Amino acid sequence: MTDGHLTDLLIEEALISDLDEVQRLDALVTAHPKPDHWRLLIEGSRTSPESRFFLVARRGDRLLGLIAGEIRVWEFGSPPCGWIYTVAVDPDARETAVGTRLFQAICARFRRQGASTVRTMVGRNEHLVLSFFRSQGMMAGPFVELEMEIRP
Amino acid sequence: MNLQMATRHALFAVLELASRPDEQLSALDIADRYDISANHLAKVLRVLGRAGIVEAVRGVGGGYRFVGKAKRLSLMDIVSLFEPIGSPDHSTAPGARTPQGQALRLVMTEIEDTARSTLSSITVETMLKLAGRMDAP
């Protein structure tokens, strides 16, 4: 470790064989096991590597973090844009720049595919995740999320 | 949304001190930099001191220094020392129980929730990075 940063961390594309580690990591940060969701995301990133991304932060045989997203084109009239829809870091590895390196890596991939904007959506009360994205320089964008219940 | 004067003074003081963590600055130093009242700022610094965000250093060359954790301290932590974010309970205000009053309350709550979320998710460290990207006057 240098200045609290891990020097032996590898940021790379996830493999299907990472599924167990991804689920372990997910269990550390959320209370909702979702193996099918993770499998589909990893598979999607393998079959559409130019538009869908699932990166992991690997240290030895452990995953310390993950980030996933995709390029969306002309959604809501927006030019090609990178969307991050999940990020997670092992609580024991926080403040070691794992999240920052994952964020920078996925932004680099978005950029290579022609996207000049990165977006995400975070719960208003998820201050830890919001703080992370803001620390990377993200601000509120031009869209407002609206929703309503449509119960029968 | 406007912040009260004391809140703005507090934010300026914390940002200035946090940007120079190895230095001690007097109220006058900070007041000069932001063109604000040193007397008013001194009172604000005492509140920040009681909250454990800054520390007074006595003696020659004394002043204040930042002792908070810039990576964790949010704007909300500072703002809430000086003013509430979100209006007081208006349920007893005239008209509050009418459908129009209830609808207005719903809209105001949305605005306040957004303000609270924004202030809670921006840390002093993030603010310093943001300020670093702004043009100097």
Image (spheres, coloured by chain):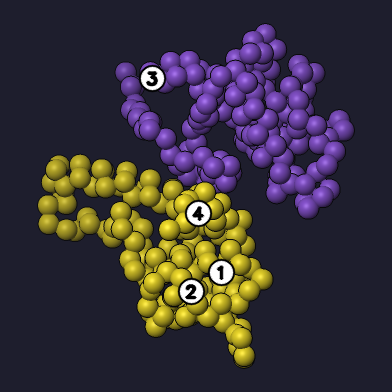
Up/down of B2 relative to A100, above or below: below
Q: Nearer the viewer, mark 1 or mark 4?
A: 4
Label 3 and label 2: CA atoms lie apart by 46 Å
| Quarter occupied by residue B128 | bottom right
Kind of residue sitting beneath label 4 = Ala
> Can you tell which chain is drawn yellow?
B
Q: Give the answer, above or below, for where A151 lies relative to B65.
A: above
The numbered dot on residue B30 is 2
Pair 3/4: label in front: 4
* Chain in purple colour: A
Q: Chain of mark 1?
A: B
Marks 3, 2: nearer the viewer: 2
Which label belongs to residue B137? Answer: none
Q: Are marks 3 and 2 in contact (CB under 8 Å)?
A: no
Dot 4: chain letter = B
Looking at the image, which is closer to me, B98 or A51? A51
**What residue did someone put label 1 on?**
B17
Residue wearing tag 3: A76
Residue B35 visible, this angle = yes
Q: What is the crowding at mark 1: few (fewer than 14 residues within 10 Å), some, or many (at least 20)? A: many
Circles 2, 1 touching at the beta carbon (< 8 Å): yes
Q: Earlier in the sequence, mark 1 or mark 4?
A: 1
Instruction: Tell me the amino acid under the disc marked 3.
Output: Phe
Label 4, on which residue?
Answer: B131
Image spot of residue A50 (x, y percent): 63, 13
Kind of residue at badge 1: Leu
Q: Is residue A119 above or below residue A93?
A: above
- Marks 2, 1: nearer the viewer: 2
CA separation, marks 3 and 1?
43 Å
Q: Residue furthest right?
A: A60
